[in-house]
Amino acid sequence: MRRFKSQYFSTVLAALLLLTQTMWAQQSEKRPRLIVKNARLFTMAEGRKDVFTGYLIVDEDGRLTAVAAGDPPANLTAEQTWDAGGHWILPGFLSAHSHLWQAAFRGIAADKTLPGWIDGLYNQKASKASPEDFYWFTLDGALDHLQHGITSAYDFSYGSTNWGHCTGVECDKLTYKAELDSGIRFVHGFQQDRISDTDTPAMAMGRLKLFMDWLGTQPKSTQLLSVMLNGGTSFNETYQQAVAEKAMMDAFHIGNQSHYLEPPDTVAAERAKFKWFEDSGLLGPTLYFGHFIHPDDAILTKVAAAHSGMSWNPLSNGRLASGVADIPKYLKMGIRVGMGVDGEASADIADPFENMRTGLYAIRDKYEDATVMSPYQVLYLHTMGSADVMGVKDKLGSLEPGKYADFLVVDPKRFGTVFDPYASLVLIAGEPDLERVYVGGVLKVDHGKLLGQDYDKVLAESAKRSAATMQ
Ligand SMILES: [Zn+2]
């Protein structure tokens, strides 16, 4: 009996020892990636408008496990601990509407509105570029976004069977590679074919399937947020476009962002196509409109009821003289609103601070009222608002436990006396104040320098290749 007991206890002891060792091993494996302490935190979390001094903890997968006031637990160690010295931390910006490749064509068609600008950029230049050219163009744009504090973007890729030399799945593959190589998070906007008598819905579906099948063979990355369709209903003269897009969305469970009601030139014709969005079933929570400057009240009411959204792109809208979207009215009606910097060929630098100010001031001018939109509201739209329309508000847009640790560090020393921290951040901050950019708790930009990237080479390749399209 005694021998049985002692055997029993030694077995239990051995098991306990093993368990303790395993737990210890797991714990040391699971040491946080990063602790940032002594930061002024602008979390943008719902119901958390107060700015407070505290810390954040990032786990080994790049997600936040704590965002709290005060000091981190004294016994907690991490791979890296950084004292922010009271500097300001906010979520990385999301651009709900970007054409990353357009960075190679900044400053183009400076005196043109949208139709002339499209002709100058797409027909005369980009149509001559190859898939490899688009790799460098896209990398150029993605790094410009990242350097300015945009850590996630919806990227309208270029390729389709209808335009130029960057066609077919090859164009999407090289664009995808550039998006990935940049280190940014992204929605890959798939450029589907323009449906016509010669380009049938079945062909468009087949090309999307080729890309999705290829994507399935690629290593999984948390940088890829989703694939969506670059909707073309407002560009096409046939209802079949909308029907084909809905079929593709259903087949692959993907969303859609459609350019709609951007230029003032074609308002009546585009409004008349709204019924195509309705009748095809495109209108719904997985659809959002790009620009959406000129809807009438009937359209707005239906968009709100369908829980569709829109991306407001004020820098680009101003540059192209497209008009001012009535954002306060959209918000009052319950439309979901995000913000985008658009492509750098119409923005012309991917700076979210400039984008917020341009938008805020355009709205205040429109209403001749300085209370119609606040600095906090516009910051919310460029973070949580964009995350919402991009379908990733469970992962991004605010600093909260469980979300990705994508955040920016701003040095407030130029701001002087702070009367209202959101006002200082939105009305004053710009490129010189952006001290650090983190994606998943990994430092990507330090005082304007892109880490792990040969940015000079990217700029040189991009410039050389865009110059070649001038021939
Ligand atoms: Zn666009």
Image: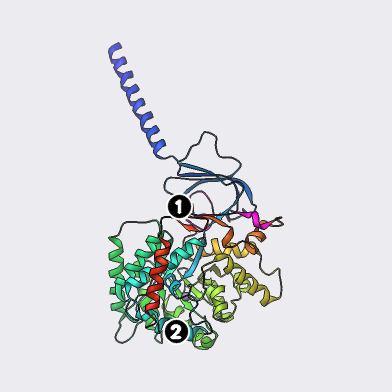
Image coords of residue 469 (percent x, y): 38, 80
Residue at image x 54%, y 52%?
399
Image coords of residue 392 (percent x, y): 47, 60
Residue interval drawn in magenta: 392-415
Q: Is residue 332 visible?
A: no
- Which mark is nearer the camera, 2 or 1? 2
Residue at image x 64%, y 54%?
413
Q: Nearer the viewer, residue 81 or 374?
A: 81
User: Which mark, residue 440?
Assistant: 1
Residue at image x 31%, y 15%?
6
164 above or below 13?
below
Instruction: Judge the density around disc 1: few (<14), some (14-19), many (≥20) Cα neighbours within 10 Å.
Output: many
Q: Is residue 367 visible?
A: yes
Which quadrant does the N terminus fall into? Answer: top left
Which quadrant does the C terminus fall into? Answer: bottom left
Q: How many marks?
A: 2
Q: Give the dominant element type of the magenta stretch: helix, strand or loop.
A: loop
Classify mark 1: helix, strand or loop. loop
Q: Quadrant of residue 352?
A: bottom right
Q: Nearer the viewer, residue 424 or 369?
A: 424
Q: Is residue 57 left or right of residue 39?
A: left
**Residue bearing the label numbered 2:** 120
